[in-house]
Each structure stands twice: as C-alpha cells, then as structure tokens.
Amino acid sequence: MLKFTRGLIIATALSGSVLSAGFVAPVLAAETERREATIMVSGEGEATIAPDMAVISLVVVRDADTAGEALSANSAAMTEVLADLKGQGIADKDLQTTDFSIQPKYRQENKPDGTYEAPVIVGYTVSNGLTVRVRDLAQLGTIIDRSVKLGVNQGGGISFTNDDPQQTVEAARKQAVEKAAAKAKTLTEAAGVKLGRVVEISENFAQPMPQMYAAAPMAKRMDESVPIASGENRYTVTVNITYAIEQ
C-alpha cells in the first residue's frame, strides 16, 4: 500500500511537471511572437519670438554697527524703491520679495604667538532682494537706473521671457515631429523595410537661457541711461518617436 502511494505521488508530480512545461512553452512562444521590431528616432524643432516681458532681480544691501540700524537703513531704501516702481506702473502682483537676510560681520585677529583670538562681531549686514516682472520692456532701462539711484546696490540676472509662448512652442513641436518622421522614413527605406504605426512619443522642452547684468557698476554711472538689448527668445523642443517596423 505504501509503495502504491509513493508511486501515485511520483506519477502525479511528473504529470504536473509535464503539464507545466507544456503550458509555459506556448506562453513563451506567444510572447516572442508579440515582440515587434521597432525603430526609435528623434527630431529637434526651434522657433523664435521677441520677448514681451523681463524678470529682474534688485537687491538692497546695508551695513551698520547694529542689526537694528542696518535693518532701518535697508527698509528705508527698499520702501523708496517699491514706491517708485509702483509709481512707474508696476503692479503689486509683479513685485515679490525673494530673499531677506541679516548677517553678522566678524573680525578675527592673529596673536603674536600665531594663535587666533575668538571672532568678534563688528557689525551687521542686511540684504533684501526683490524680483520684478517688467511687462513694458521700453521701461526696463529706466527702472534699473532709477532703482540704483534710490539705493539698489546689487543685482542678479535679467530673464527675457514671454507671457504666453504657447504658439511658438507648438511651432517648434510640429517641426520636431516632422524632422523625426522624415528621419524614420529615410532609415527604413534604406533598410528595405516599411514604417509601421507609432508605438510611443515623448518630448523634451528647453526654456530660453536668461541674460545677465551686474547692478553694482551701474551705481558709478548714475547720469547714464542703462542700455538693454532684449534680442529674441529661442524655444527648443526635442521629440522622440518609436515606430513599429513592418517587415
């Protein structure tokens, strides 16, 4: 009876193995059949447009013996700058404080024996940064010039941008797709195969790079207007397309 049971178990196990192998083989074959030959190509499209808006960074920095004195001097200067900007038509929504800091200034002296004394606070620096969106580019040079005269003594970059660049981006996107499709056609014709359906599409979009200016040197040229060249913004779209190949 025991031998019969063992035999039955072994026979059942072997039967299960055969059935499993018989079941997996068609699945693998089906997966192999489902895999189709593909080709992936990329195309890059560019479109340019004149900017209609600029984003600038204006910073007021003040030093004083105490934090309170430095803060008062900084706040007074920034208040004048803000009032002047609003007087030139800059809306509240286009003015944003983006950086504010109060930092101690230290002095550390060397002793005759080569060691260092503990650092001593000798003053404070207060920095207040303002991001401004200028929608009338004709005002840009005047805004920078007046801001410097009112107390702005540091600055960051000017970013020339567009309020609504969607049509320009779409033109670049269409150009990128056309280039990718033309490349795929050339490659498949050269390989002697036919181009099939689109399997996948993806894109990468590059924003225009900001142009830079330095605000500090402008303070030495207060009687001169600030020359600004806006140029053109170039929007670039790269499209990746995967096609099936009909052999």
Image (tube, helix red, strand yellow):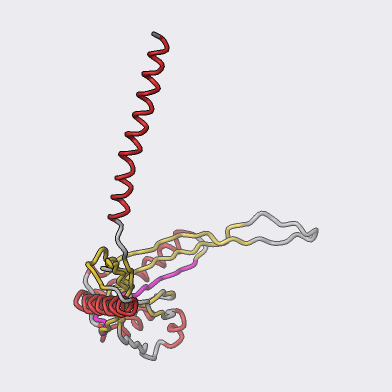
Q: Is residue 134 above or below residue 225?
A: above
**Towards the viewer: 125 or 7:** 7
**Towards the viewer: 139 or 104:** 139
Corner quadrant of residue 127: bottom left
* Residue 133: percent from left, percent from top: 28, 73
Residue at 66%, 54% (x, y): give it.
118
Residue at 21%, 71% (x, y): give it.
91
Residue 169 visible: yes
Q: Seen from this angle, which residue lies furthest right?
A: 113
Q: Seen from this angle, which residue lies furthest bottom?
A: 224
Q: Which residues are magenta?
A: 50-63
**Towards the viewer: 194 or 16:** 16
Residue at 36%, 78% (x, y): give it.
158
Q: Quadrant of the N terminus?
A: top left
Residue at 28%, 50% (x, y): give it.
30
Q: Quadrant of the C terminus?
A: bottom left
Q: Is residue 95 magenta?
A: no
Magenta stretch, main secondary structure, is: strand
Corner quadrant of residue 177: bottom left
Q: Is residue 73 left or right of residue 45?
A: right
**Towards the viewer: 111 or 92:** 92
Q: Is residue 60 magenta?
A: yes
Numbered disc total? 0
Corner quadrant of residue 10: top left
Residue 235 visible: no
